[in-house]
Amino acid sequence: MLRTLNEDQASSDGDSDACDDLDRRPPPQDPCYRCKKRVYPVERIDVGVQFHRRCFRCRVCGLQLTLRTFHFDQENDPDVYCKNHVPKFVGTIDDQALGVRMALNAPKANHLEKYRGSVFNPGWQYEGGVLDSPNPRVKKSRTSLGTYQDYEKSGVFAAQSALETEQKREEDELYATLKRDKEKKLSHIERELEMEKEQSVQEMVDGYEHLKRHKDPATLEAETRKLEDHVQVGACLLRKKEERIRQMMDRLNADAKESVSRLIEKHSQEMLGMIAKRLSLGENLDESIEMDDDIDARELERKVTDRSQPPDVCPPELKRNQMFKSPKEFERVDGHVFNVVKSDYLSFTDLVRNLIVNCETDLEKARAIFRWITVKDLNKLVIEEGVNPESPMGLLRGIQMGTESYHDLFKRLCSYAGLHCEVIQGYSKGAGYRPGMRIEGNKFRNSWTAVNIAGSWCFINCNWGARHVKGPQYTDDDADGVSTDGKMQFYYKCDEFYFVTDPEDHIYQHYPDDPKWQLLECPITLTEFITLPIVKSPFFTYGLRFTVHYDCIQYTQDGIVVLQLKIPSLLGFGYTFEAKDKTLNPSRLEGRVMLRIVGHNAIFTIAPPKAGRYFFTIYAKDDWNSESLQSACAFRIKCVENRDVIKSPFPKVPFFGPTPLMQRCGVVPETHLDPLINCSHEDVMCTFKLEDRDVKLSYTYKYYGPWEHDNEDFQRFVFVKHRDTRSLTYQIRCPLQGKYVFTILGESEEITAEGTASYDCLFRYLVECRQPGKDKRPLPRACHRWLQGTLLEPLTGDIPMDRHVTFRVRAPLANDVALLIGDVWFHFKELHDSIWEGSVTTGNSAGKAKLYAKLDKDRSRFSPLIEFQVK
């Protein structure tokens, strides 16, 4: 008798939080003009009509376009073209022409609207210079302030040293002023506290003296209570004073940071101006044509101004993968930086001079500074406030004292290297942020940097790039870079994602106060930023991508949410699924997530156990055998449906699909690439291609409910229908309705303790049987030597006792075929087409019946092929 397993009742948890206003489905958007599919904020390009970024291509040749390189056909249907294929329009141009009429009626566009479409400024009405040139900035202006050789030739390093000395004096004065202000305010607070303390003690003494003069018990008790209340009030005042000190210190620290930041900004501009001036003077000295003094001065001033001013802020010309393919390209630069880190320097001039000595481009300069900051463990610095500014430790005192951030240090070093750098303020989805949380006030405030590399602004984040991890750290004596003692300790590990991050990836984590610093062709709003899912650096490092745009809050449909990621190669995944309702038993969340790998897609199916809100986080790893997982992305799942659509749990297995061992064993699925198999009534036939004819395979088959059963061996419901040197077919039967897990196992390289080969998972299927077939009998069991054969009859694994049963099998490799029941052998006769037939009597004893074949003419040994059960 089959009995269904009931689940707990599902009900809404009724919770709420600050992001209720975001718990709504996004409003419908206009479709992409090219593909007609929905356009989401991150992938949108608006030129009066909307395009996906990937669809923004020339209609004729398919060239990928940008807002600075496209041309618009204003006469015919609105579409975009490259410069070579834009349709030529011949006709009269007057105030009735489309572009002229709109230009006359349009109000003046602001700076940002030059680079994106709007209601008043459609995307095709740009300045002529923007359309004609791929770079809207003046082509003749230099975007780099020279190389190391230019600095040596123009005397930049000597001038830098002199300017740094002056700037240090100014910085010392600022720190001295900050110290005096801090001591003055602390002294004032301490005096107030001392006065409060003396007053409180005096009041307590007076109260005690007054208490001694009263002998009446009732009065004595009342005065005692007053004295206790007075003591409590005094303690409360003391806590308030301590809170005042904390608040004052926070204000002082904030003011100090702002003052130091302003000073670094001033010093950086001075340093860049000095470098530009020295380089321009050096060029003028090389010119062979003598110029008038006034003309020469004006030309020099123009060059200095042109070089010292940062370029306009606009999206970068090149993507990260166009600038460099892999961090391995910087091995030469990084190796030099690792040697520089071992030494301490007395000045920024000497430090940067040594860092950029081998750098030939702006990109290499930025790389050298980035790696120096991420390698140098600045948290280990112990610096006293009175440290000598001329000492090596004084060079980095701002970092240890908390008045200078990694971004300030990066900006300072970039100015010495001749790179324009900006510290950007805004919000970040960092530690403590969960999907859908509101962003307001000072919470989640952060800063990061953008550096100008060869004329394009690029995001570089040294703070998040220096990731603090725990693991075996090697020492300088470990030449091969491996720890000799294997001790686990905290150290910095460089996160390459934060070195030159593409704007469309950067926007998932950082939202600047000024929209232009999104560096997107179409900036998004703060609300759109909040609705983006939480995406961490490993997501991009491992090459993951969303197949479609997902909001951070996902609503169930028919009781499930499906999230799909594109994967470049087979990765290891993990996940966590937790309820916002902490009263929900964690055991009810087990088996509520199914992961299956289908080709280059990782598909997560989430089935909440009841209505409510949940948090779902995906982790990834590149090494399949590693136990270290890194957070990739996170979502909020909201189930608003009633109990009728709540799904039953999935089998508690890590994933469904292939493993790396499958490729090594040369096994390829041919019929069922998706590991989720839905079946009704009929058996399932799974066929695999075998690239290695000698590969050893096995399988497991388990039932996971929802029905209770007495069957202990579901392995008997899988049969090797056929196997030859090139393919393998499994016949899978489902005797009960519900979920089954079918796992293909292959021989691994590991050896068990008994000295035999071990078997690991190659491919795992989830078989969902909606309606079992009429034939629920078990199947025969195939042995390892069952090759190139076909079982014709019987097709069931159970043979009744005391019956005459006819066996027929096609065995092309056999020279003789026989069946063994108990101790009795029944030899078959060969008919035709390698078909062997035999009629046997099963007898009255239960047991096994094995079909054997002699596969070698020169040997008398029989090998087992198929096994039956006599019942």
Image (tube, helix red, strand yellow):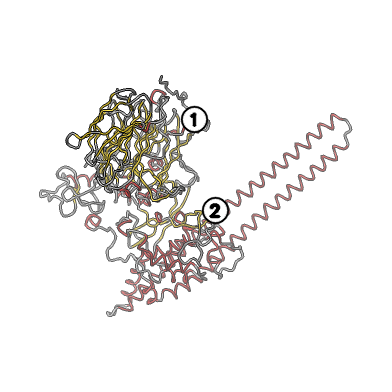
Label 1 belongs to which residue? 15
Rendered view: 488 above or below 268: above
Quarter containing the C terminus: top left
Q: Nearer the viewer, mark 1 or mark 2?
A: 1
Check disc 2 and give the amino acid type. Ala
Q: Residue 47 at x, y = what percent? A: 25, 45
Residue 568 can be seen, yes or no: no
Label 2 belongs to which residue? 254
Q: Are marks 1 and 2 in contact (CB under 8 Å)?
A: no
Q: CA distance from mark 1 to mark 2?
A: 37 Å
Q: Nearer the viewer, residue 756 or 461?
A: 756
Q: Residue 219, located in which quarter of the rendered image?
A: top right
Question: Position of 441 compared to 739: left or right?
Answer: right
Look at the numbered disc 1 and give the secondary structure of its residue.
Answer: loop
Rendered view: 96 above or below 278: above
Q: Residue 146 at x, y = what percent? A: 36, 70
What residue lies at 45% left-to-right and 30% top-to-bottom?
Answer: 612
Q: Residue 298 at x, y = what percent? A: 33, 71
Mark 2 is surrounded, within 10 Å at the Cα level, by few (under 14), some (14 to 19) or many (20 or more) other residues, namely: some
Query: Among all residues in the image, which is located at the extreme top?
Result: 1
Look at the numbered disc 2 and give the secondary structure of its residue.
Answer: helix
Q: Residue 672 at x, y = what percent? A: 28, 38
Q: Nearer the viewer, residue 624 or 587?
A: 624
